[in-house]
Amino acid sequence: MPKKSFFKRYLLTGLLIWVPLVITLWVLNLLVSTMDQTLLLLPQTLRTESWLGMHIPGLGVILTLVVVFLTGVLAANFIGQKLVAFWEGVLLRIPVVNSIYKAVKQVSDTLFSGSGHAFRKVLLVRYPHPEAWSLAFQTNVPSELTSRFSEEHVAVFIPTTPSPVNGFYFYVRRRDVIEIDMSIDEALKYIISMGVVTSDSDTQERANAARLMSGRDAPSAANK
């Protein structure tokens, strides 16, 4: 085996090991650092810097979970509901802020509500032109619009890659879409990775093929 291809092979192998690990650690560090900002809500005397002389990473995660949990407990009773309604009323009276808050509130209610439906099914739709297919998620058609269509339509969200939080929202005829047997998580994985990451079975098949090829290369290299 030539020295250049030998070096390239092991360099790529090292990258495949380190890149996912480094990115995972970077994301975790970003999340923990962001949640640690909630420690600023505590008085200076209660922070670990005051009585331990050092900052302990991760305490903000615990504090964030406690705050979110207590907020849920408070909002579940009558007084808490009144406070939430008052606070929302104040936000909805502020120009610009009311539009942003209302839109985010509707999305969060859909995603996190136990009775809500975020994405129902994974579909294939014709986009961006009639000769192309794109992955899409079926959402909800507003009841006031169903009577406007002469035939059954579905609401679809077509996410962009690699950021699926952005995309396009369309109403498409039911007969123009194809339902596919794929989970929401799997479809998101394809979109975020731009199709590079596939299913676990496909990954295993490629790994087996790579091992077979490496086994074949070893004798040939030895013969050389």
Image (cartoon, rainbow, N blue to C red):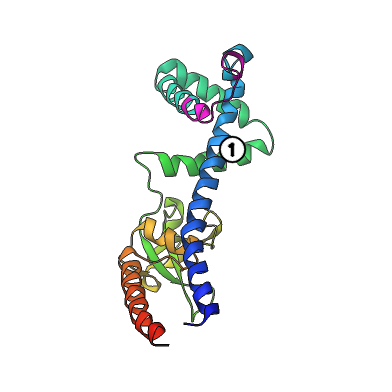
Indicate yes or no whether the magenta region holds residue 51.
Answer: yes
Please tell me whether residue 125 is drawn above or below residue 216 in the rendered image.
above
Please tell me whether residue 131 is drawn above or below residue 103 in the rendered image.
below
Q: Quadrant of the C terminus?
A: bottom left
Q: Position of residue 164 (x, y in %)?
A: 51, 57
Residue lying at 49% horizontally and 24% vertically, measured from the top left:
63
Mark yes or no: residue 170 visible.
no
Could you classify mark 1 by the number of other residues whose Cα lies within 10 Å: few (under 14), some (14-19), or many (20 or more)?
some
Please tell me whether residue 99 is drawn above or below residue 213 in the rendered image.
above
Q: Which residues are magenta?
A: 49-62
**89 or 178: nearer the eye?**
178
- In the image, farthest residue toward the front: 223
Q: Secondary structure at mark 1?
A: helix
Query: Which residue in the protein does label 1 denote?
Result: 101
**24 or 134: nearer the eye?**
24
Indicate yes or no whether the magenta region holds residue 8.
Answer: no
**135 or 33: nearer the eye?**
33
**197 or 73: nearer the eye?**
197
Q: Position of residue 115 (x, y in %)?
A: 34, 40
Q: Position of residue 101 (x, y in %)?
A: 59, 37
- In the image, farthest residue toward the right: 95
Q: Is residue 109 left or right of residue 36?
A: left
Of the residues shown, which amino acid type is indicated by label 1? Answer: Tyr
Please tell me whether residue 151 is drawn above or below residue 73 in the rendered image.
below
Residue lying at 48% horizontally and 52% vertically, measured from the top left:
21
Question: How many callouts does the rendering have?
Answer: 1
Q: Position of residue 168 (x, y in %)?
A: 54, 61
Residue lying at 37% horizontally and 68% vertically, measured from the top left:
174
Residue lying at 46% horizontally and 68% vertically, measured from the top left:
196
Mark yes or no: residue 15 visible.
yes
